[in-house]
Image (cartoon, rainbow, N blue to C red):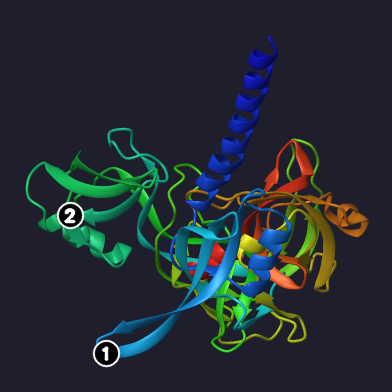
Amino acid sequence: MKKSYYKFVSLVFVFIFLLSIVVPLGEVLSFDDGFLAGYADVEIANENRRFGSFITTHLEEKETKVDGQKSKKNEVVFKLFGFIPIRRVSVTLCDQEEFYLGGVPIGLSICTDGAIVVSNDGNSPLTEGDIITHIDGQKFDSLDQIPSLLQNAAGEEIEVEYLHKNRPIRALVKADRESDDVKLGLWVKDDVSGVGTLTFVNKNTHKYGALGHPISDVNSGNVVPVSSGKILPCNLIGINKGRKNAPGELKCVFIANQKPKGNIVCNDKFGINGVLTDLNGLVDENLTAKVGGRLGVKLGKAKIVSSVSGITEEYDIEIIKANLQKSPNDKSIVFRVKDKRLLGLTGGIVQGMSGSPIVQDGKLIGAVTHVFLNDPTKGFGVYADFMMNN
């Protein structure tokens, strides 16, 4: 009886031991070459046992030779028991450059790379929010080119390429040739505007990142492709406070024909980016930070930067979850707003605050992206690592 008992206990301990290695190992495999890391991140990961009790991280410099030329690259080495290497991942040191912190609302005006369907006559396979990219195999740069493409297309049906829920689709659409103009029964537009929050600006290059999540069509979910765009000065005129199941919003205004503050060159799943030409009113030059990689993000105290009060301030939050994701997405961090001032102003996180910088231990680690609908005091954030790499 005793032997069976001890055997059972031994098997339980072995199972727990293997589990404590296998589960963190899956997280180790989630890191791809090129992610941002620094020496402080590695220390924090080890102090907080980010990968359990048996796997530690080490930042090492490796010398390589290409075509006779020596160069050095940095690697994070994951080690079992502190001395058995189980994975090496090349990294970019993230504590080299400084960034201005944003937190201010900005106006966004985008010319889309394609035509967004606003409505149809009911005879087309395209639906509201689909984005037309080619007509009869031809790409177009503006809506003015569409009539001539339709006129030149032969046959009663015209091939249309479009995006539906971010998937490219080809379809034949019946053309109306009874009038002088050829029509497809679709009403389209090629511009999008809105409001978001600036996250960071590189102190030297003035390249910026904002929003932390993509600008998408409300109806189709398509990520809006950018042909060109501009950042415009924006004024906060009021706040609708968030409540349970009723997300609030920042009420902002901007004028589309104002002199732009910068351009928009890309819109992807981690927000928009480009270069600012005028920082006045967008950044506080005394408010800067270096980047902290996702390896060093820890549970506990942090801050978000926002200008909802009329001036750029830091507000207390608590990080309650920091995901180690197998594939990058914009719900990396889960946090709760703890600051009574911010709760009094907004009720928590509201629409328009997406892009507000998240700072921990003086480093930029992420940006606000979403609010919990059933609890506006809780929100999601994306790692700065993902925004920087894009």
Residue that numbered label 2 is attached to: 150
Q: Is residue 377 above or below residue 95?
A: above
Q: Is residue 234 above or below residue 161?
A: below
At x 60%, y 32%, the residue is 14
Q: How busy is the neighbourhood of tag 1: few (under 14 within 10 Å), some, or many (20 plus)?
A: few
**Residue 369: x %, y % from top left:** 64, 54
**Residue 89: x %, y % from top left:** 46, 64
- Marks 1/2 in contact by CB < 8 Å: the verdict is no
| Amino acid at the residue labelled 1 | Gly
Q: Nearer the viewer, residue 389 or 38?
A: 38
Q: For residue 165, which quarter of the picture?
A: top left
Q: Is residue 121 left or right of residue 339?
A: left
Please name which of the two marks, 1 or 2, marks the residue nearer to the observer: 1
At x 70%, y 80%, the residue is 283
Q: How busy is the neighbourhood of tag 2: few (under 14 within 10 Å), some, or many (20 plus)?
A: some
At x 69%, y 86%, the residue is 280
**Residue 373: x %, y % from top left:** 71, 39
In this orientation, does residue 310 appear?
yes
Q: Is residue 17 left or right of residue 64?
A: right
Q: Nearer the viewer, residue 193 or 290?
A: 290
Q: What SS does tag 2 mark?
A: helix
Give the number of callouts: 2
**Residue 371: x %, y % from top left:** 70, 47
In this orientation, does residue 108 appear?
no
Residue that lies at the very extreme toward the left in this rendered image? 154
Residue that numbered label 1 is attached to: 68
Q: What SS does tag 1 mark?
A: loop
Q: Is residue 209 above or below residue 53?
A: below
Which of pointers 1 and 2 lies earlier in the amino acid sequence? 1
Q: CA distance from mark 1 to mark 2?
A: 57 Å
Residue that lies at the very extreme toward the top in this rendered image? 1
